[in-house]
Image (tube, rainbow, N blue to C red):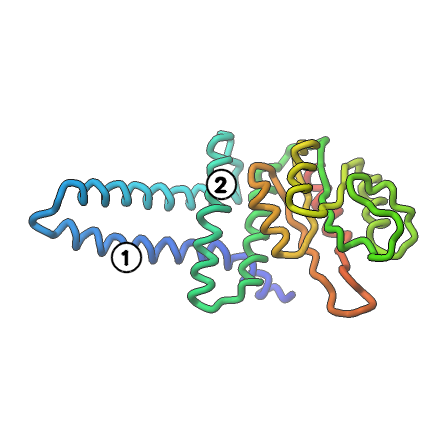
Amino acid sequence: MKDQDLYLSVIKFPAFVSISLLIISAVFLIILFNVFAQPLLANWVRILFIILLAILIFVVLGWMITLFSTHTRLKPKWLQKLSKWMLFNIYYPLAKGLAHITFSSKKNLIESFLYFNNEIVLTDQKDIRNTNILVLLPHCLQKEDCTIRITNDIIKCEECGGCDIAKIKKLITEHNVDAAVATGGFLEHKMIEEKKPEVIVAIATAKELVNSLRDNWNYPVYAVLNEQSTTSNEKNPVNISFIAFAIKQFK
């Protein structure tokens, strides 16, 4: 990816959220001025619009705090949790809505969202050394005809070299971290609740990563994109160096 394309990919999500909030704010203020210009305005209408204005201000301030969190750690835990919840449940849907209206590439927006999330996680974990790191792997990394089914224990891999699981096994052994294969949303969530990791490094396709991030929003999840190959001789490749980089950021 060229530097310019990478830059555009990184800024697309925050730009779309900011533009969405500007449009919503402008439209709301125009409506607000027109409504309050009415000579006989019912009190319940006045109260309703004041409440809506307060909500809009809250959402805009929340977005400013979320942008701030990509560069500086939010120390109050409640503010950190609130910011992450709003990121996944308010700002991401806003950006998706604008992308849909403008016929923008959904894939590029999702990748930008993942970059943005990773910046928050790296900022939040800066100078923190974690001992309980969980690497979540997609089941598609293991070759289909393998007789050893790996779920909670990747160490069972016999390292035949038929897929990338052996390389990842060596990596997690070197760094002394846990790894598990996510075979579904419910099992993944159950696995995380049992292990209660300090940081999660998740490897999956873009769509799966977004779902995992939203399901586990109260955990710091660093996303490693695993693009499935279209060639028959290189199915489901994974960038081992990206996983190694992610682990080193939190150890």
- The residue that appears at 48% across and 52% down in the rendered structure is 92
Horizontal and vertical percent for residue 9?
56, 61
Query: Where does label 2 land, which residue?
Result: 85
> At x 77% / y 70%, what residue is drawn?
231
Q: Could you say which is closer to the camera, residue 86 or residue 193?
A: 193
Q: Which amino acid does label 1 sit on?
A: Val
8 and 184: which one is in front?
184
Judging by the rendered image, the residue that carries numbered circle 1 is: 27
The location of residue 61, given as percent across then percent down, is 38, 42
Give the left or right position of residue 192, taking residue 124 as reference: right
- Quadrant in which residue 5 is drawn: bottom right
Upstream in the sequence, badge 2 or badge 1? Answer: 1
* Residue 126, disc: none
Q: Classify mark 2: helix, strand or loop.
A: helix
Q: What element carries label 1?
A: helix
Which residue is located at x 66 percent, y 56 percent? Answer: 205
Say which amino acid is labelled 2: Trp
Q: Are marks 2 and 1 in contact (CB under 8 Å)?
A: no
Q: Residue at x 88, y 57 (%)?
A: 162
Residue 119 visible to the viewer: no
Residue 21 placed where, x, y %? Answer: 37, 53
Task: Say which quadrant the N terminus sits in.
Answer: bottom right
Q: What is the distance, in whole Å, between disc 2 and disc 1 at their CAs?
A: 25 Å
Among the 4 quarters of the image, the one containing residue 101: bottom left
